[in-house]
């Protein structure tokens, strides 16, 4: 069992709600252990990576089970299953869930569960593709401790609710900190700089890392201009402008940032998995891409690792070179921090902070979350 700060709260909650040793319950259920793994970021503040997609898929399936079967005393084996659109709508009603995709319900929850529990023969989500109906694997909701069987469905809901509350509070504190920093005088810029640099740490939430990367890159390029036109006599001066083209970490098949008028594509990633890079290259038909990578390693080393991993997987130099030629640039955390320093020297510190606040409020549906907290 993985132990972290939130684990003790899970154990205490299980003990309080069941009257049984919560640690024994946790150790007896792979599903509770999975939730324990996914809630690791609960007490690490808003900057640590949050896990909502798979947890919410589990949440809505268990909630449907409780409402339509458990509380009605019905036989789940005879239940016709939950309608996908109902589950998906419910996911998006939950805090931080407004932009969730359908991947977790369709395959990602099962995929990740089996990654952590490869010996398990059970899948969490059961699905009838023909009717598009969904079920939770009821066998995972029944556990035995000291010869007695327990249904942990309501415990699962309670634990995930605790996680949601912890993350809502952390995010509200993050926004409040941003707003407080906006009020600081220029002599207190050291505090603002330290705050923003913290968003580039390895344990930073993936969405905040992407937002901070966009904000820094936007103002790094902000005062740079090019001259372009169709003839020498019609050249015009135009500043470089960076645009965020979709939701952060959305798995929507899109490109994260686009620069006008040069047409640079930027893709943000946390992984060094060569398949991810080649998939991004393939989806834009080998249009040159600049990757922003969440690592402290030097760009040349990252590029070398990608190429070596590709050669190990594909083994054909010509194929690998064609993909590698599409990687226009690798930007890692040290370069982002260097760009950040250059933007500060040009007087853009407050602009970067304001951009982070604006993009965070949009991305996390701030007004809705705050209304749920207050």
Image (spheres, rainbow, N blue to C red):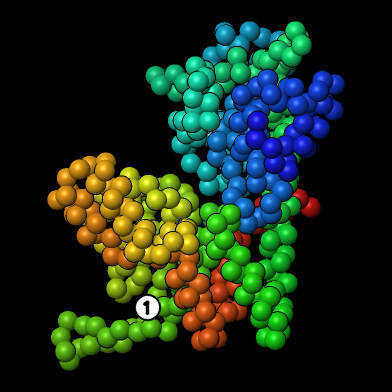
Horizontal and vertical percent for residue 41?
Answer: 65, 46
287 and 201: which is toward the camera = 201
> What quarter of the picture does the N terminus occupy?
top right
Say which quarter of the image contains residue 240: bottom left
From what the image shows, is residue 158 above or below residue 327?
above
From what the image shows, is residue 87 above or below residue 28?
below
Say which quarter of the image contains residue 326: bottom left
Say left or right for 100 vs 366: left
Say which quarter of the image contains residue 137: top right
From what the image shows, is residue 180 above or below residue 85?
below
The residue that disc 1 covers is 240
Q: Identify the residue at image location x=62%, y=53%.
A: 48
Secondary structure of residue under mark 1: loop
Say left or right for 19 vs 176: right
Q: Crowding near pointer 1: few (<14 within 10 Å), some, many (20+)?
A: some
Numbered marks: total: 1
Horizontal and vertical percent for residue 78?
Answer: 57, 8
Is residue 67 at least partly visible in the picture? no
Horizontal and vertical percent for residue 104?
Answer: 50, 35
Say left or right for 222 vs 325: right
Q: Identify the residue at image location x=47%, y=34%.
A: 108
């Amino acid at each position: 069992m993985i132990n972290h700060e939130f684990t003790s709260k899970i154990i205490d909650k299980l003990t309080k709600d069941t009257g049984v040793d919560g640690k024994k319950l946790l150790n007896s259920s792979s599903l509770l252990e999975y939730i324990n793994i996914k809630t690791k970021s609960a007490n690490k503040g808003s900057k640590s990576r949050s896990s909502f997609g798979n947890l919410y898929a589990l949440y809505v399936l268990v909630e449907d089970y409780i409402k339509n079967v458990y509380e009605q005393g019905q036989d789940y084996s005879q239940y016709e299953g939950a309608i996908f659109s109902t589950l998906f709508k419910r996911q998006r009603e939950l805090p931080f869930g407004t932009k969730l995709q359908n991947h977790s319900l369709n395959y990602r929850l099962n995929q990740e569960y089996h990654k952590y529990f490869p010996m398990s023969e059970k899948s969490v989500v059961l699905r009838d593709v023909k009717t598009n109906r969904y079920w939770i694997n009821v066998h995972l909701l029944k556990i035995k401790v000291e010869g007695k069987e327990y249904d942990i469905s309501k415990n699962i809901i309670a634990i995930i609710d605790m996680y949601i509350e912890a993350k809502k509070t952390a995010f509200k504190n993050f926004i409040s900190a941003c707003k407080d920093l906006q009020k600081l005088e220029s002599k207190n810029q050291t505090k603002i700089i330290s705050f923003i640099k913290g968003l580039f740490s390895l344990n930073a939430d993936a969405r905040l890392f992407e937002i901070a990367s966009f904000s820094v890159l936007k103002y790094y390029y902000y005062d740079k201009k090019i001259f372009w036109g169709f003839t020498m006599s019609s050249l015009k001066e135009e500043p470089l402008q960076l645009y965020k083209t979709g939701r952060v970490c959305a798995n929507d098949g899109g490109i994260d940032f686009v620069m006008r008028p040069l047409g640079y594509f930027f893709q943000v990633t946390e992984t060094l998995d060569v398949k991810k890079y080649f998939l991004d290259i393939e989806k834009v038909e080998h249009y040159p891409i600049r990757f922003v990578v969440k690592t402290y390693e030097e760009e040349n080393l990252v590029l070398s690792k990608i190429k070596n991993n590709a050669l190990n997987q594909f083994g054909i130099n010509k194929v690998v070179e064609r993909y590698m030629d599409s990687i226009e640039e690798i930007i890692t955390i040290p370069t982002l921090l260097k760009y950040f320093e250059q933007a500060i020297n040009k007087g853009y510190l407050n602009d970067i902070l304001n951009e982070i606040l604006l993009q965070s409020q949009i991305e996390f549906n701030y007004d809705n979350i705050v209304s749920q907290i207050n």
